[in-house]
Amino acid sequence: MKKIIVLAIGLMLFVTGCGSKSEEDLIAKFEKNVSNSKSYTLKGNMEILSNEETFTYSIEANYLQDDFYKVTLVNQTNNHEQIILKNNDGVYVVTRALNKSFKFQSEWPSNSSQSYILSSLVKDIKSDDNKVLEEQDKNYVIKTAVNYPNNSSLTYQKIYFDKDMNLEKVEVYDKEDIVNIKVVFSSIDLKSGLKEEDFLLEDLIDMNAETKEDSTNNENKNNNQEDNTSNNNETNNTTEENTTNETSNNTTTNENENIDEECENEECDTKSSNILDSIIYPLYIPSETYLSNSEEIDTDEGNRMILTFAGDKNFVLIEEVASVASDFEIIPVYGDPIMLSDTIAAKSANSMYWTSDNVSYYLTSNDLSTEEMVTIAESLGNTKVVSGSK
């Protein structure tokens, strides 16, 4: 009887040990695949849920051993593209449409969780002693804590694998168990053969120049075609124009008189069509804080709105139409890139800068935390409450 009991206990320990070892082996397999990769390329889609709105990005992330990264994010709603580049010179956030880049001396991406960076997922798994691996329909899910310093509501993530521990999807949840970030991978190549030359800032600048040149050539071609068509039609239109000129002139005169009259009453500004003609107010303002002043300043490109908020949390919000630099511009920032719902912001010690829907925002405060700044920025990017500036 004693022998039977001893054998039974031994069998239980063996089975339990195998189960535990199997879980460790599965996690170790993913970690080994990532650590053995000298370079990788992954593609997929990322969804960010903010205030019941969903922002979708196409994403491509490239990695090269020794901490080289190039992540291309394209907002599928407005086709706004931004590239996060990390090489030996630093971290850049490049917005080619504006011909600008921010340059950071930053620990990105290791200073927070990143759902599209494989080393970040491995770090989260290793750091969490309470991680859980579950089997679902012969596939596997690892649940771990996350580290998002600028968003304390994000608490954990689920990392989904197929039966061979190939990564398929990542979901990041908030305190209410709602998915806030979801990344679905369409392809992952762990042997992409990338080189340092694939992570040069100059190449992104050159690509931007080539795109502009192609655009200019196409525009010139279209203009030439329009000129030819216009010349062919000019003779045919001459008679009609002579016939209608007198009536048209009388009509135009009357219309101009009406417009002048209206502009005198409404104080029209005809300086430029590229003008921010409305104030975009944040939907979130810290408690015991209020709008104390709004001011409009004329600039070469149009105008600039300055909103001053006072109270418990003083801050200033500046808004203006985003301008395209004539030459590629690099702006140094002593801080970090921060992912908002619809764009990437540049965050320094007491300020944050970002562009959304062709409007550039600058937020500065000695009282706001980074998380409060992000919340204000998110409230501007989702639903816009507009009021006339005059």
Image: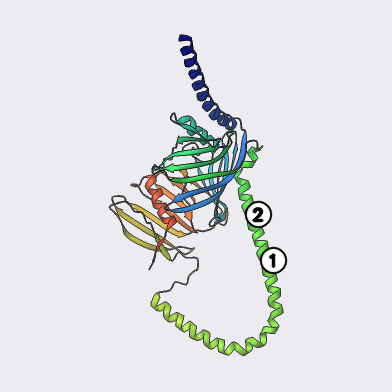
Compared with 147, 205 (above or below) is: below
Q: How is the image coloured?
A: rainbow
Compared with 300, 112 (above or below) is: above
Label at residue 307: none
- Residue 117 located left or right of residue 179: right
Q: Amino acid at mark 1?
A: Lys
Query: Where does residue 287 sit, x and y in percent of width and height?
Result: 29, 51
- Residue 98 located left or right of residue 292: right
Residue 334 seen: no
Compared with 134, 93 (above or below) is: below
Name the residue beneath numbered marker 2. 210
Label 2–label 1 contact, CB within 8 A: no
Q: Nearer the viewer, residue 52 or 22?
A: 22
Compared with 110, 240 (above or below) is: below
**Residue lying at 43% horizontally and 66% vertically, measured from the top left:** 277
Label at residue 221: 1
Q: Nearer the viewer, residue 307 or 372?
A: 372
Q: Amino acid at mark 2?
A: Glu
User: Dot 2 surroundings within 10 Å: few (below 14), some, or many (20 or more)?
Assistant: few
Q: Nearer the viewer, residue 45 or 140?
A: 140
